[in-house]
Image (spheres, rainbow, N blue to C red):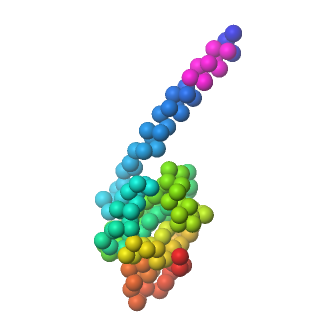
Amino acid sequence: MLGARLLQRCAGTLRARAAAAPAALTTRRPYASKAVVEATDVTFEKEVLKAPRPTLVDFYADWCRPCRMLAPLLEKAVEGDGRVGLVKVNVDENQTLAADYGVMALPTVVGFRGGKPVAAFVGMRTAPGIADFIGEVVGDAGGSGGGGQA
């Protein structure tokens, strides 16, 4: 009898958590930098494809440790450089975007210029490597090409 009540209580808790999950998935995450924007399938065109300046798109997932390690480096680089914007796309919440841009591993960072992807890298980068990647995305002749081509 006690076991059945415990199972009912646990099942009720799980149903409540599942019902609350969609609301949690749609909340915007706070970022230390005002230069960082969270994009979704709905806002990607406005935030990236029609952006007035080159944009780095960080495809990430909350559970991805390398993504969490790379994020502050990207934010600092974008703030310090000022020539590019940074848009974050959670691949768990925006699977269509991830598929559209061939994201197969995390983190994946794609640089867009004029609404088109011009360069990309997968995995971690050092701060100088990110600076080189930004140079490649904005089209600097002095950029060493630290990122790979998309």
Reply yes or no: does residue 47 show up in magenta: no
15 or 78: nearer the viewer = 15
- Residue 39 visible, this orientation: yes
Q: Quadrant of residue 82?
A: bottom left
Residue 124 spot, x, y in % from top left? 54, 68
Residue 146: percent from left, percent from top: 50, 81
Instruction: Name the side, left or right, on which 101 lies relative to 26.
Output: right
Magenta part of the chain = 4-12
Q: Residue at x 54, y 55 (%)?
A: 95
Looking at the image, residue 78 lies above or below residue 26: below
Count every numbered label the image shows and give the total. Answer: 0
Task: Give the overall secondary structure of the magenta segment.
Answer: helix
- Residue drawn at (50%, 54%) of the image: 94
Q: Residue furthest top?
A: 1
> Is 8 on the left or on the right of 79, as rendered?
right
Query: Is 3 displayed left or right of 36 in the figure?
Result: right
Q: Nearer the viewer, residue 23 or 46?
A: 46
Q: Is residue 10 magenta?
A: yes
